[in-house]
Amino acid sequence: MNEREIVLQILSAVLEEGAYSHLLLQAVLDKYAYLDKRQRAFISRLTVGVIERKISLDYILNHYSRTPVKKMKPMIRNSLRMGLYQILYMDAVPDSAACNESVKLIARRYRPLKGFVNGLLRNIARHRQEALSLLKDASPGIRYSMPDWLMKEWSKRFGREGCESICKSFLAPRKTCIRVNLARISVEDLIEKLEGEGVSVLRSEDLDYALYISGYDSIKKLLSYREGLFYVQDLSSMLVAERAPVRGGSRVLDVCAAPGGKSLHIAEKLACMDRSEGRVLARDLTEDKVARIRENIARSQMDNISAQVFDARVDDAASHEAYDIVLADLPCSGLGVIGRKPEIRYRLQPKDLSALAGLQTQILSVVKNYVKAQGSLVYSTCTISGQENEENTERFLAENPDFHLISQEQILPDASGRDGFFISVFSRG
Ligand SMILES: C[S@@+](CC[C@H](N)C(=O)[O-])C[C@H]1O[C@@H](n2cnc3c(N)ncnc32)[C@H](O)[C@@H]1O
C-alpha cells in the first residue's frame, strides 16, 4: 500500500464508520514500521488535515461539483477531499500529483468515475485563489470547519472573538508535550539523553518538568520512552496533579484512570516526597483499560501505584472516607482536545453534553463518599462546556454542603497548541 491508500483507509474508517483517528493512525504507523520519517509525516498530516477541514473542503467541492458531496460514494468523496486538501494546503505537493493520485485511488473500483474526479480536482486547482476566497467569505463555521451548534454555543459562552480564537487554536500545529518522570531522572539528564537520541527538546515556560519534543521518528522506539523516563501528556492535563494537594504519605484514589497519566503523575510526586508511604490506586471500567494502566505503570517502574477494574458508578463501602485525595477525571465530551482528536466535533450532538453532565453528576455523587474529613475531591474534564464544568461544580456544591470549593479553572485551548481543560478542587469539612 502506498501512503495515500493508507490515508484513504483511515479516512473511511473515521469519517464513515466512527473510528478514532489518533488510535488508527498510531496502529497504522506501528504496523508499517518500515515507512520513513517523511512518509509517516505525510500520512499523519494528510489524515488529520482532511478530518479537521472536512466542512471547508466539502463546501468548496459542493461549489464546483454538480453532485453534492453527501450523495457521492464514500470512496469518491474521501479521495476528492484528500486531493483538494493537498491542492489547498500542501504546497510541497504539485497540483498534478494531487489530482493524478486521487484518480489512481478510485480507478480500480470506480473506473467510469475517473473523469469526474480528475475534471473536478483540476478545475478547482485552476481556480485555487477563487476557492480560497470563497472560504474567506464563508461563515466562521465553514471557515473553521466547525458545526454551527458548537459555534453558537461557544459564541454565547466566550464571545465571538473567544469562539474564533478557540477554533483557530484547533488548527494550530501541535507539539508533542512530555512530562519528565522526576522520580527516575532529572529534567537536565533527560534532556541530555533525548538529545543523545537525536531528539530536539524545548523547555516549557509554564512547568519546569514539561518539555516539547520533535525530530524523532517514533516515540515508542526511543530508549528513554521504553525506560519510562517520560510520559506523553499535554501541559493542561499536567495541571490536574499540580492542583491536587498531594502531600507525603497521601492515599490517593483515581476513579477513572486509564491510561494512567494523572495517576502516575501523582505517584511520581509522592515518590519524590520525604515520606514514601503514599500510594495511588488507579481504577477504570474494563480489563482492557486497566491493562493499559498496568503497561504504563510497568514502563514507569513506579511501585507506589496499583490498578484495579471498578465501575465508578457503583458504591464501594470499603472505600468510604478512606482517601486523602479522590481524583475524578471523568468521561466527558472532549471539546478541549479537538486539536488532537479532530473528529470529535462531528460526532457530538447537543444532547450528548447533557447526558455526559448527568453521568458526571452520578459518578461524583458516589465517589465523594471516599474522601476523608479534610480530604480533597479533584474534579476534572478535558472539555469546555459549561454544563459539564461550572454547572456541575455548582450542582455538586449545592447538593453537598459538607464540601467547599478551593479552586475552579477553565483552561481554554490556545495558540500554543495546549488542550482545553477544567479543574475544580473541593475540600471536605
Ligand atoms: C478522561 S479519561 C481518563 C484519563 C486518565 N485520567 C488519564 O489521565 O490518563 C476517562 C476514563 O473514564 C473511564 N470510565 C468511563 N466510565 C467509567 C466508569 N463507569 N467507571 C470507571 N471508569 C470509567 C474511561 O474508560 C476512561 O478511561
Image: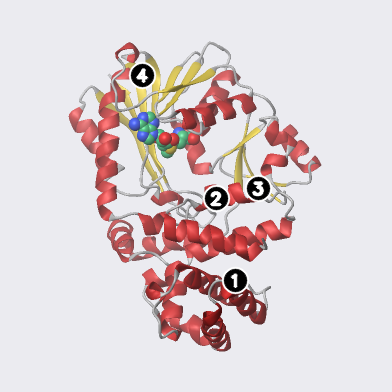
Q: Which residue is mark 4?
A: 375
Q: Residue at x 71, y 49 (%)?
A: 33
The kind of residue on which mark 3 rests is Lys
Q: Nearer the viewer, residue 261 or 426?
A: 261
Instruction: Name the secondary structure under disc 3.
Output: helix
The kind of residue on which mark 2 rests is Leu
Which of the marked residues, 4 or 2, is nearer the chain's N terminus?
A: 2
Which of the marked residues, 2 or 3, is nearer the chain's N terminus?
A: 2
Q: Residue 376 in the image: state x and y as whole percent.
A: 36, 23
Q: Is residue 88 above or below residue 389?
A: below
Q: Which residue is mark 2?
A: 24
Q: Which residue is mark 1?
A: 105
Which of the marked residues, 3 or 4, is nearer the chain's N terminus?
A: 3
The kind of residue on which mark 4 rests is Gly
Within 10 Å of the Cα at label 4, are there few (<14), some (14-19), or many (20+) other Cα atoms?
Answer: many
Q: Residue 408 in the image: state x and y as whole percent.
A: 35, 38
Instruction: Name the secondary structure under disc 1.
Output: helix
